[in-house]
Image: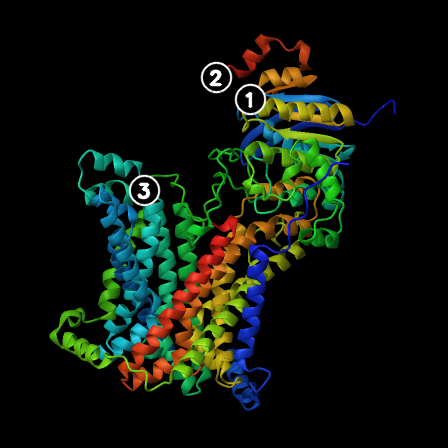
Amino acid sequence: MSLAVPIFELNQVTQQFGSTPVLRDINLRIEPGERVALVGPSGAGKSTLLRLLNGTLLPSQGEVWALGRNLKSSAPYRLRQVQRQIGTVYQQFHLVDSLQVVHNVNAGHLGHWSFWKAAVSLFWPLDVETAAQALARVGIPEKLYARTDQLSGGQQQRVALARVLVQKPVVILADEPISNLDPELSREMMDLLRDLSQQTETTLVVSLHAIAFARSHCQRLIGLRQGRIQFDAPATAVSEAMIEDLYRLEG
Amino acid sequence: MRQSPPRPSWLNASSVWGVLLVGAIALSFSQTGLLTRPWLNLDGWPLLWRFLAASGQPDVSPAMLHLTLNATLITFSYAVCGTALSVVLGLVGGILASEVWWLAVFPHQAGRRAYLWVGVRSLLAIPRAIHEMIWGLFFVNIWGLDPLTGVVAIAIPFGAITAKVFSEILDETPRQPLMALLNSGVSPLTALVYSLLPQARLNLLSYVFYRFECSIRSAAVLGIIGAGGLGYQMLLSLQSLRYSQLWTLIAALVVLNGLVDLSSALLRRRLGCTSRLALNQLKLKRSPLTPLKKGGTGKAPLFKGDRVLRDGIDQFGLSYCRQPTRQHDPILSGLGLGLMGLIPWCFWYVGADFSKLWSPRTLQLLGDVAQSAFPPDMSGTPPLQLISLSAQTLAMSILAIAGAGLGGILLSFPATHNFLLPGGLLNPGQGNRLSRVWAWGILLLTRGFLLICRAIPAPIWALVFLFVLFPGILPGAVALGLHNLGILGRLMAEVTENLDQRPLEALKAQGTPGSLIFLYGVLPMTLPQFLAYILYRWEVCMRETVIVGLVGAGGLGRLLTEQLSSFDYQGVVVTLVCLIVLTFLVDTISGAVRRSRPSAS
């Protein structure tokens, strides 16, 4: 395919909650295989942008195209088909605490599994081999049958990543995946995300507070400030001055 | 190939409890004698039909409406007075029963402290174990049908329950400010008033509202023993077969309950308390490595279409209130003042003669009762019969709570705002007009059904079922089950509405269909909390077996009623001991099950 369909394309997207605009006039194109970091101060709209990308939110104005489909005009069934190709890792893991790890990992299958298969699996876990492999990949194979709420934060984040692995998405979105982890774990998690993206040619869009990781692990940086894109450049072209400007305090 | 860990055994705490549960329900079922003797009274059908048919023609004559209004005001006033007194008792008892109070008083005498603390707690356990109806029947024998009987019958057990809950709330409130004051030499009571009480006031207040909702239901029940109000009038109409009047009264009770529940919910929302009932066992612990930034996710609206929740999601403690956003809410202050005025008015309207409380005659009568009660005498009822009646009572409570729990879970989901409505879990789209109407219809219907179930007192339900069921534990269990179904369904709906949306959002974002979001998200997150509610309600059901026993459903309640009406106080003591033992047994089992589940501890 010479003219590959972009993974994401945003045209004139504005998102507001009530009367407060959170994102304004966003135009953006993300190609297959890219590793993109969203950076910017708190409240710049990074999380909102990610939620637009995975179809959790629909834009107030403008168009969000994901995998060649306009999310806003898609029927719920079509929307879900697109969403199955998009895996998301969250800052606070968003796991179901009271379930065993194996079920939280298997939740990655839910876009494909039939209701009955999913129901049976809650009592007699199915496809255990896939779940075990995913957990081995993220480094906690021994936690397969542990209860999720008994894991540490770093381990829970790995479970969340294992869920995405099982989902086998075309693109992984990560919303501040390391902000609750210590420096050591942060590096491991970022390495995992980068290796995964490289080995399986999965597109990666990750919002980060740690600029160093953004530079070292991603190819492209998008700076968001007050709901607008302040810069969008290759990691190598982003200067200290640009970063300082991005985080400059108001007034 | 890598070795994955072995599958855990089927045999674990949950499965053992599950088997025990099924066994207990089966045993209880055999107690009903459903298979061995006739239970359906076909002769009662015409009567039931007349009762149901009358629902279409409630009596709306001016005289009846006047009577209904009067009765409603009486029931309401009983509830207000009962709650007010129980809050006073609860506050005093709650402070005395809290660990932190004794810590403040005796900072360095651990031994004496434990002794006093445990002492007060056990002292409170006895009035709590006895249902307000029994207190009512007891005081009727002393004061006759004085309104005082109704008020005190609510205030004593509710005061003890409130004290227990208050003490738990106080013990869970952060202590550092209190300790700071104590260490600077402030006296314990002053220190408490300046630290713990203001810190805990929202949780305390939220619980008071919930208690008031319970008081309304109890006030209606107490009417049945003759204390007046809606319950009394309902009993009269039912016994004199004037069903159209009965329906007018039922409507009044439903409206009263609905209004109280609604205004209590609104008030609590304004105060920032999302849930009615604090079950401290329900707090889900977060591991220390996953700090939850307050309002961390609050910057973006959470989930589903136009219902935007912006205040952050602090719902890991079930009913722990947030600080209100505004310091001075004019509506709240206005309502507060209104309530202050309402309480004296209710005391005036009830017209209870409180001087009777300490009159010499009361003391003399109490002394007489005490004298005639001791030594307890079981000659009236042989031990074997007592055991069999106890088993029946236990079976009734198990059947009632099993039915109420199952029905509550099933009905709670259609009764929530975030389920079938457009944008809800099972209806992701915006929906057209028809689906909107349909969804709202289902919601209002289930809510209405739950409201009717809980508004009508269990003894009235029992009397209705006694039309077509032969007396025994079956009509009692059905009546108790239905009444508690209404309460549980609403509490459970609240759990679902207050659920942490983030795991659900994550499932939704990866394209999971609604049915599977329910299976992998909603059910695992709600079931532990549902279970805790069911167990808590089982404890209440056990106490309530007495009130359906009163109208002829079997068990210890019936025996107790007979003994009380024949002034057989020696027998009463024996029956009461049986009831208290059963209540403690149920509380212990319920506590053990709750603790055995890691999520609910």
Q: Position of residue B225 (x, y in %)?
A: 33, 79
Report how far apart the C-alphas of labels 2 and 3 lie in the structure: 36 Å
For residue B205, side relative to residue B14 (left or right): left
Q: Are marks 2 and 3 in contact (CB under 8 Å)?
A: no
Identify the residue shown where x is 48% and y is 85%. B471
Front residue of this view, candidates B505 and B260: B505
Report how far apart the C-alphas of labels 1 and 2 lie in the structure: 29 Å
Vertical position of residue B85 compared to residue B240: above or below:
above
Q: Which residue is mark 1?
A: A183
Q: Are marks 1 and 3 in contact (CB under 8 Å)?
A: no
In the picture, residue B411 is in which quadrant? bottom right
Numbered tag placed on residue B599 in the rendering:
none
Q: Amino acid at mark 3?
A: Gln
Q: Which residue is mark 3?
A: B199
Nearest to viewer (mark 1 / mark 2)? 1
Q: Position of residue B85 (x, y in %)?
A: 26, 61
Numbered tag placed on residue A250 in the rendering:
2
Crowd around label 1: few <14 · some 14–19 · many ≥20 (10 Å) = few
Determine whether the residue tagged by mark 3 lies in a helix, strand or loop.
helix
